[in-house]
Amino acid sequence: MKIHTNTGGLAVTNAYLIVDETTGMAALIDAPHNTTAPLMNVAKHNNWTIQYLLLTHGHWDHISDHKVVTDQYPQAQILIHHLDEPQLLTPGSLFFQLPYKIPPRKADGYLEDGQMVHIGNLEFTVMFTPGHSPGHVVLYCPAESLLISGDLLFAGTVGRTDLPDSNPDDMRQSLLRVAELPDTTDVRPGHGPPTTIGAEKISNPFFNF
Ligand SMILES: [Zn+2]
Ligand SMILES: [Zn+2]
């Protein structure tokens, strides 16, 4: 497995390109504004097929580039939890007018708790982790000891829960769930640098149970 990262947009959000090099099958995870083209160039250059755009949640900073992806890879399926699909159908910020328009679109399918997503021979488990948003999910690959944590868990902090669609109690339950993953789990968040579950247990004041 290989992971490529690109970061951008107004909220400095991470996009990930994950590939199973043995099959050439790949997926993008999250699509911040103006971040996906360089990742797709890497895929093109290596002759990888992007099967999915997997969205951890529906906030504008994670979905902005969705059409950029499907314009280049029309067969790529956009998957999101059904509780966050409304934000894909009516994209935007609740706080301010974005300086660009995100086209609305329907999901091609849904991510549900316990569902397996296969990227070639890689197997990711969807974990439903609401709190930051109602339909937030993280993606866990036990074989690679990798967690794509979206806006649930960051290095040193956690996703905000003061948004109109947030729920602090759900957030606590979701954090407790990922706290059970092995300490060595490589965590790739929606914002900021990589970390591990073990490092966050030691140093993250919001991840201290
Ligand atoms: Zn968010
Ligand atoms: Zn975010």
Image: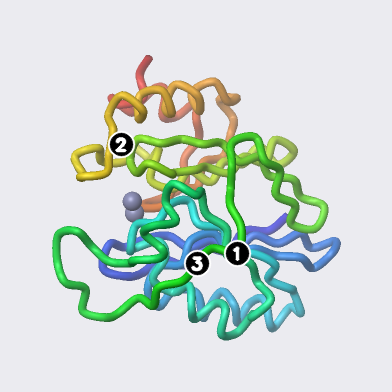
Which residue is under mark 2? 157
Quarter of the image that includes the C terminus: top left
Query: Separation of disc 1 and disc 3 at Cα?
Result: 7 Å
In the image, residue 27 sits, relative to residue 203, either above or below, namely below
Q: Quadrant of residue 184?
A: top right
Residue in view at x 57 percent, y 78 percent: 70
Q: Nearer the viewer, mark 3 or mark 2?
A: 3
**Image marks 3 and 2: residues in contact by CB distance under 8 Å:** no
Is residue 192 left or right of 128 when viewed as pictured? left
In the image, residue 37 sits, relative to residue 139, either above or below, namely below
Residue in the foreground of this view, choosing between 133 and 32: 133
Residue farthest top in this picture: 209
Which residue is under mark 1? 108
| Quarter, ligand 2 | bottom left
Callout 1 environment at 10 Å: few (<14), some (14 to 19), or many (20+)?
few
Callout 2 environment at 10 Å: few (<14), some (14 to 19), or many (20+)?
some
Residue in view at x 54 percent, y 20 percent: 180
The residue type indicated by label 2 comes to: Thr
The mark that comes first in sequence, 1 or 2, is 1
The residue type indicated by label 3 comes to: Lys
Quarter of the image that includes the N terminus: bottom right
Query: How far across and how far down the image is residue 12, in percent?
Result: 31, 63
Circle 3 SS class: loop
Residue 90 tag number: none
Residue in view at x 40 percent, y 39 percent: 152
The mark that comes first in sequence, 3 or 2, is 3
Callout 3 environment at 10 Å: few (<14), some (14 to 19), or many (20+)?
some
**Image marks 1 and 3: residues in contact by CB distance under 8 Å:** yes
Which residue is under mark 3? 106
